Each structure stands twice: as C-alpha cells, then as structure tokens.
Amino acid sequence: MTIFDQILEAQELLGKNRENAQSPEEKKLLLLAIEALWFVWRNGQSYEFESYLKDVEANAPHRVIAAFNTRDEADAWLRTQSKPPDLALVLIADKYHVVLSSRDGTRCSLVPAPDLEYHLEEMMRDGLPPAGVTFNTREDADIWFNGQAEPPAQTVIQIGGEHYLAVYYRNINHRALFPFSRVERLHERRKRRAEEGLGE
C-alpha cells in the first residue's frame, strides 16, 4: 500500500469517527487531523512523511531539520529564514536545540533542548543496550558509519569501551554519534535543579 493509499484510508477512518463524534470539540479535532493529512498531500510532502514514519517505527531520536558545526553558523541560518520553523529541532555541534519564534517571525532564538538525553535515558531503562558493533577508535567507527549509503535510523555501537548511539537523520543525510554518558549529565542537571527547588 502506497503512502497515498494510507493517507486516504486514514482520512476515511477519521471521517467515519467524526460522523459518530458526540461533541463539536471532537468533530473539530478530527477535522483538524483530516486537514493535516491533506496539508501533507497538497504540499507535496507525502514521501517525506513516509520517510518520517520509518523513523517513528524505528523508535529513532526526534528528527532535526538542519545540523550545524557552530552556534554562529546556526544563528546565521536562522537570520535567513523569512518564516522561522517554530518548534523545529536542529543540531548545533551535535546538541539538540529548538527554534522558538514569535508568530510574526520578528523574534526568534535557538534554545537547548534535552530531547536526545531523554531518548538515551529511555533506551537505558533496563541498563545499557547491547552494542551491535564494536570499534577500538572513533576513526574506525566513523569509517564504518560513513561507508554506509543509508544506515539504520539508529544503531548502538561501542568505541573503546564506551557506548554510543549512531543516528542517521535521513531527511538531511546527517550522521551523528551520541555517547550514552550524556544521560549522566541529565541526571546531574536534574539533581542540581531539585536542590535549587526548580523543575526539570
């Protein structure tokens, strides 16, 4: 079944549920879902949506729309956006940031986001996941990772005794290696904020 067939079937199912919905609020929300799928279709994003669904099925980390080596590069990119992609995620030096923008786009910023740390933490709920492949050096791991035309969305690897998550962002053809030790920093930050009486 093609992505177009799936979208049409989903809309049909949503339409039936809308007919049986009891409240105007439910009907409005179901119509919103139907129109969201039409938005994907009519803006020529059906194949991109299909690619996104593959990442969802693989339980991969949240997608990013761009990756930058430095904050200066990211800020320069953001200044060129006539309509900043509000709430979209980007990578800056392999750290997640979220785009925050006013509705009119006159004020926007990039704010650090802990999405990746939460993902790693969830993967470690029952302890460190087993590594699918092991390397002695980062260079060896990079050669392996970059040598794949289209790697899996995520793969647990081990480099010199430390576990990493190798993530392939297929939508921007970007590869990144994230150490699971980032979770320790997340826990330290939580502990510090708890001691200060602040939320997460």
Image (tube, helix red, strand yellow):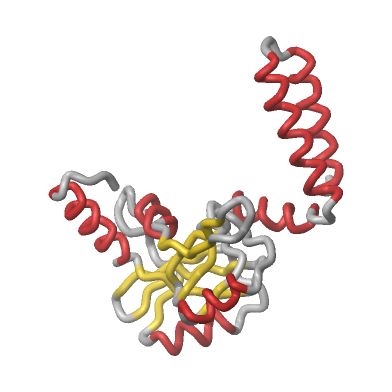
Q: Going 46% across and 77% down the picture, which residue do you hit?
A: 71
Q: Going 41% across and 70% down the picture, which residue do you hit?
A: 178
Q: Nearer the viewer, residue 58 or 109?
A: 109
Q: Nearer the viewer, residue 78 or 177?
A: 78
Of all residues, the one furthest to the left in this rendering is 195
From what the image shows, is residue 99 above or below residue 198?
Answer: below
Q: Going 49% across and 63% down the picture, which residue do you hit?
A: 109
Q: Position of residue 120 (x, y in %)?
A: 39, 57
Q: Position of residue 59 (x, y in %)?
A: 53, 52
The image quarter containing residue 145 is bottom right
**Residue 196 appears left or right of 158:** left
From what the image shows, is residue 78 above or below residue 160?
Answer: above
**Residue 36 appears left or right of 25:** right
Q: How many marks can you see?
A: 0
**Residue 49 appears left or right of 137:** right
Q: Position of residue 1 (x, y in %)?
A: 83, 45
Q: Going 53% across and 80% down the picture, which residue do you hit?
A: 73
